[in-house]
Amino acid sequence: MRTLRLVTTLAVAGLLAGGVAVVAATPASAARAVFSVTNNWGNGYQGQVTVTNDTSAPITSWRVEFDLPSSSAVSQSWNAQQTTSGSHYTFANVSWNGTLAAGASTSFGFLVNGTGTPVNCTVNGASCAGGPPPTTPPPTTPPPTTPPPTTGTPVERHGQLRVCGTTMCDRSGARVQLRGISSMWLNWETAPYAENLSALTWMRDNWNLQVIRAAMGVEPAGAYLSDPAKARAQVETIINNAVTAGVYVIVDWHAHEAQNNQSQAVAFFGDLARRYGHLPNVIWEPYNEPLQVSWTNVIKPYHQAVVSAIRAADPDNIVVLGTPTWSQDVDVAAASPVTGTNLMYTLHFYSCTHGASLRAKGDAAIRAGLALFVTEWGASNADGGLDGRSCLPEAQSWIDWMKANGISWTAWKLDVGTDTTNLLSPGAPVTGGWTNYLHGHAPFVVANMR
Ligand code: MG
């Protein structure tokens, strides 16, 4: 059996003052465990386990097991496949973090109700304890840290965003209405338009685009759940491009039944928040369009779990929350908002289908104190315009309403196709320069971005 080293980072309420590390017993074996305080609250804490391959050969899977006292229990975990038997917990790798090169590390995290710490820890069947503790943190993918090379970009002008009342404000406290476009479902793009830096820069400079939404499909075949490495790479490319171009980027968990995969969403957003949450560019959107399911019993608990995973690493970036009925029932969400700061709520409209009665729901939500963000819209039927028809007068009423209420928006969607909402026509280069390739509602969208 190849030897693994285990580093356990635990936050234990009341155990330690000042978050100082405590080192477990370290007999002369290759495995070891380190406990340190990172985050805790009244009667619970957040733990992290880092698995390190100390051998000179790659490993292709790992499994960590431990027990908790009966007074404590894991409530959530991420970046590992958790199975529970009484007080015994087993965490195995998921597809993207199973292979560890020699010396490489990976981490998973969990929340515990109670203050009891793990005992009887094993990694691939061997004791976790052993060896000296590391003197440096485990390596993670380095996030971009250099400022955008250009001047006068949207992010340079506005900086860190926050919710102010029912609208969005920039770092100077001025109200800001961001306008931009959404990608296609990233798993169904006909070409990688959304991942192209030249195209993004061109849209910024020619369309006045300020924000791009990365619509990461989750549930369909080929999307996140079946190919997480590919989907994550697409999203991270878009984030990195947005940082370089100085535009805002929405990370969209593009799902319709996200409550069925809550642990994956918690893991995804927790991990990205740790690596990108310090950047002013990023806006989190944990649930594109819930179906007609209960806000209070289904959607709100999901949001609370994902928001707490984000906030464990990123205390301030805006989170935009999906609402029932394909993100239309913002008035329902307003009756029982999610607890937290810098939270906004999603309203989606398609102007051949939705008009004044949906705007009235938006008005009711705003009166109740919600801040709204339209992360999808089209001058089309709600199916995205399969019939090719546009409804521009009603779309103009929506544009005027969003402007009057300071509501930011991203229009659906950056791809070639025959739907009204496909912004590009066949032959559009992947690198931008699309003046002669606008399709469907694109001329209307672009005119309202400028
Ligand atoms: Mg932040």
Image: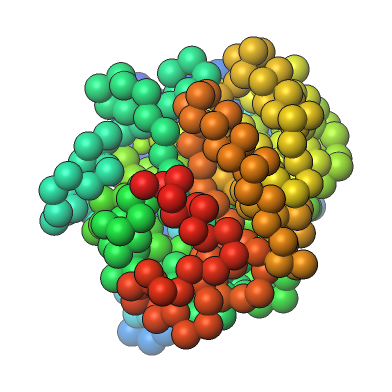
Q: Nearer the viewer, residue 74 or 388?
A: 388
Q: Nearer the viewer, residue 386 or 119?
A: 386
Check the image and report above or below for 168 versus 353: above
Q: Picture coordinates of residue 190 (x, y %)? A: 56, 80
Q: Nearer the viewer, residue 164 or 117?
A: 164
Check the image and report above or below for 356 versus 194: above
Q: Regarding ligand 1, which quadrant of the image does it lie in?
A: top left
Q: Picture coordinates of residue 300 (x, y %)? A: 72, 32
**Residue 292: which quarter of the image?**
top right
Horizontally, residue 27 falls left or right of residue 217, namely left
Q: Picture coordinates of residue 76 (x, y %)? A: 65, 44
Check the image and report above or below for 187 versus 210: below
Residue at (64, 13) in percent of width and height = 367
Q: Nearer the viewer, residue 15 or 145?
A: 145
Horizontally, residue 64 falls left or right of residue 181, namely right
Residue at (22, 47) in percent of width and height = 153
User: How is the rendered protein coloured?
Assistant: rainbow
Residue 266 visible at all: no
Residue 450 visible at all: yes
Q: Picture coordinates of residue 361 (x, y %)? A: 74, 25
Residue at (49, 15) in percent of width and height = 165
Residue at (76, 53) in percent of width and height = 382
**Residue 326: which quarter of the image?**
top right
Number of marks present in the image shown = 0
> Extreme front residue here?
393
